[in-house]
Amino acid sequence: MVNMTAPSDDYINLGSLFRNSATVTFVIQIVAVIVMIGSLAAFTIGDVFFALGEDLKILVLLIASIISLLIFLAAMSVFVRFSRRIGDAVVGPGIEEVRMNTPRVKTVVAVYAILVALMGITGVYSWYLIDANYLVPWAASLGSFSIRIFGIALGAFVIALLIQIIIAGVGRSATKVIIEVLDADDSEFLE
């Protein structure tokens, strides 16, 4: 018996690729916000914490653990609520697995990947300039490691947001282009 189905290596699940890209950037944003809140809290109460007695330090650590878990649970709630909406906003209806041996589909996917990579590189380099010229001197002037961590987390948030905007904008248009390419290929095949 001959297997009439094409091997799975010829197909790529573009819907899943676009959705997963947006979800990963959303997770990075959530983690960055949690780290920013924690580092600002550490900066605010840092000297006061070390001046406390041992019994009060334990109490503060327990309260901080409770607050951290509440923030984490709130972040999980936000993630569960918005991850599907983000995925639906990124990928238009009607596209999931497509054949990668179609030259025009390969081109659209390659241009999409290059655009996202260039946006990521541009975001990282832009943030590096902001960080080196403004945030590092600011943290050094305050002598605060917490502010330094805040700057790094803020950078991760901004870069993930930029990439997510590109994924959302390009994902929809790439989906439409790929559907048009596939429709054109089907109509050429039928003629």
Image: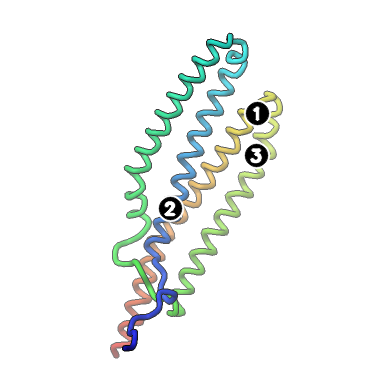
Lateral position of residue 149 relative to residue 34, left or right: right
Give the camera-side residue of 133 and 150.
150
Q: CA distance from mark 2 to mark 3?
A: 25 Å
Quarter of the image for the C terminus: give it: bottom left
Lateral position of residue 104 relative to residue 127, left or right: left
Q: Between disc 3 and disc 1, whose residue precedes? A: 3
Instruction: Return the x and y of residue 37 as percentages of the image width and height.
Output: 50, 29
Image height of 144 relative to 6, above or below? above
Image height of 16 relative to 155, above or below? below
Q: CA distance from mark 3 to mark 1?
A: 14 Å
Instruction: Return the x and y of residue 117 as percentages of the image width and height.
Output: 55, 59
**Secondary structure under badge 2?**
helix
> Which residue has dot 1 on it?
145
Lateral position of residue 46 relative to residue 19, left or right: right
Q: As shown in the figure, which amino acid type bears the numbered disc 2?
A: Ala
Q: What residue do we see at 48% from left, 34% from top?
A: 34
Q: Quadrant of residue 98?
A: bottom left
Quarter of the image for the N terminus: give it: bottom left
> Which residue has dot 2 on it?
22
> Which residue has dot 3 on it?
131
Q: As shown in the figure, which amino acid type bears the numbered disc 3?
A: Asp
Q: As shown in the figure, which amino acid type bears the numbered disc 1?
A: Phe
